[in-house]
Amino acid sequence: MATEIIMPKLGLTMTEGTVYEWVKNEGDEVKKGDIVASINSEKLTADVDAPTDGILIKILVHEGEDAKCKDPIGYIGTAGENVGEEGTIAAAKEAVVEAKDEESSEQPPQEVKQKLVAQKNNSNETGRIFITPLARKIATEKGFDYQQIKGTGGNGRVTRRDVENYVPITQTVKTENTAFAAGTGLTGMRQIIAQRMMSSLQNTAQITLQLKADITNLMDFRKDLKQKVSQPLLDGQLSLTTLVTKATILALKDTPEMNAWYHDGKYEKVTDINIGMAVAVTDGLVVPVVKAAGSMTLTELGRSLNTVIDDAREGTLDSSAYSSGTFTISNLGKSGVEYFTPVINQPEIGILGVGTLLKELALADDGKVEQLVKLPLSLTFDHQIIDGAPAADFLAKIVSYLEDPYTLML
């Protein structure tokens, strides 16, 4: 009996995903755990693994097409196996979509048509060209005549990989409209980020508050502790990222209404404190989550943060690690930014922005000038859920914990 390949659900608000690429083709042999496809959703490109050994006997959702979470996107079985009525219906639906796609596509010049008919290049007996929507879009952006590209997908279908590997004999001149589309179109992770950012801004009432934390004592505390501990601290337990995260966790415990979700018009407090950490990657931005962070020691927290951040950058983090966050931290300190306006990662209702370290001169109580180390913090919150005063108190609690470093040890 054929086994379904399912569109995974990567986040609380995810309802559907886009098949970005099929790594395997119909008829390919696969082993359980092999990557068969990649999908786009929730700010990332995630891999889909084969649930069992067998043959990829049917692709239901092709590259560039969408599917609802938990719906099948393909089948794995034995060679020649019939996937049943559901597969037949999906195939029929696909054929209808392809027919509409072909009818609405821009027709090539007459001389190109005649050449193609003579060559019968990658078409079936009806003369139709099979190409995935994503491949068609990329071909248009590159100015390629996709009818000249040899398809390697099922039934000779032209895939994204075929378009990207194609070298035209003569360069097609782009029209003004094509050039415009190539300059402005968003694809892949960038498109998902754009959609989620706009959704966040359109569906929340975002306000940003800013404060500086005097972390002079914290920096001295770190230095002193490192000198007194006999063994090297290799788990990042005293990194500034870990200490700011710990201070945020303590403030969330004091202010449980901030550790919550708001989606579909419903406000839900969450018991576990799951901290998301915004991480820049090659294709954009991802937010891996350290779950149950509220119960961790500094060493456990530092180790967990290092692991999820490193794995996210390497692209090896399991897709489940990108969901269920209750509060996010975004750090632009390395970029030299002081204050900024982080955008809420829905369905969360708050996000903390961390700026660069600042050295400031101040007059001490004894009249002497001293140098202080300040850390700019920016809190964006959803004013639909949290009023300004409790949000300000929450940010002040984070500052208070950072300015009293011994409390971070508790």
Image: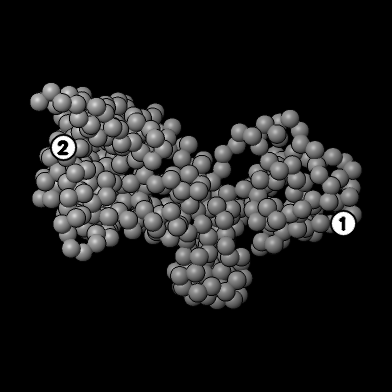
Quadrant in the rendering for residue 300: bottom left
Instruction: Tell me residue 355's x, y (percent).
Output: 33, 35
Name the one closer to the observer, 377 or 258: 377
- Which residue is found at the position 30% from the left and 42% from the top? 328
Q: Secondary structure at mark 1?
A: helix
Instruction: Tell me residue 303's x, y (percent).
Output: 27, 58
Q: Earlier in the sequence, mark 2 or mark 1?
A: 1
Residue extending furthest toward the front: 368
Name the one closer to the observer, 75 or 169: 169
Determine whether 122 is above or below 264 in the image: below
Q: Looking at the image, what colour scheme do you see?
A: one colour
Name the one closer to the observer, 272 or 80: 272
Circle 2 sits on which residue? 403
Nearest to the eye among marks 2 and 1: give it.
Answer: 2
- Which residue is found at the position 90% from the left and 43% from the top? 111
> Which dot marks residue 119?
1
Callout 2 touching callout 1 (CB < 8 Å): no
Q: Residues within 10 Å of mark 2 (few under 14, many from 20)?
A: many
Q: Residues within 10 Å of mark 1 (few under 14, many from 20)?
A: few
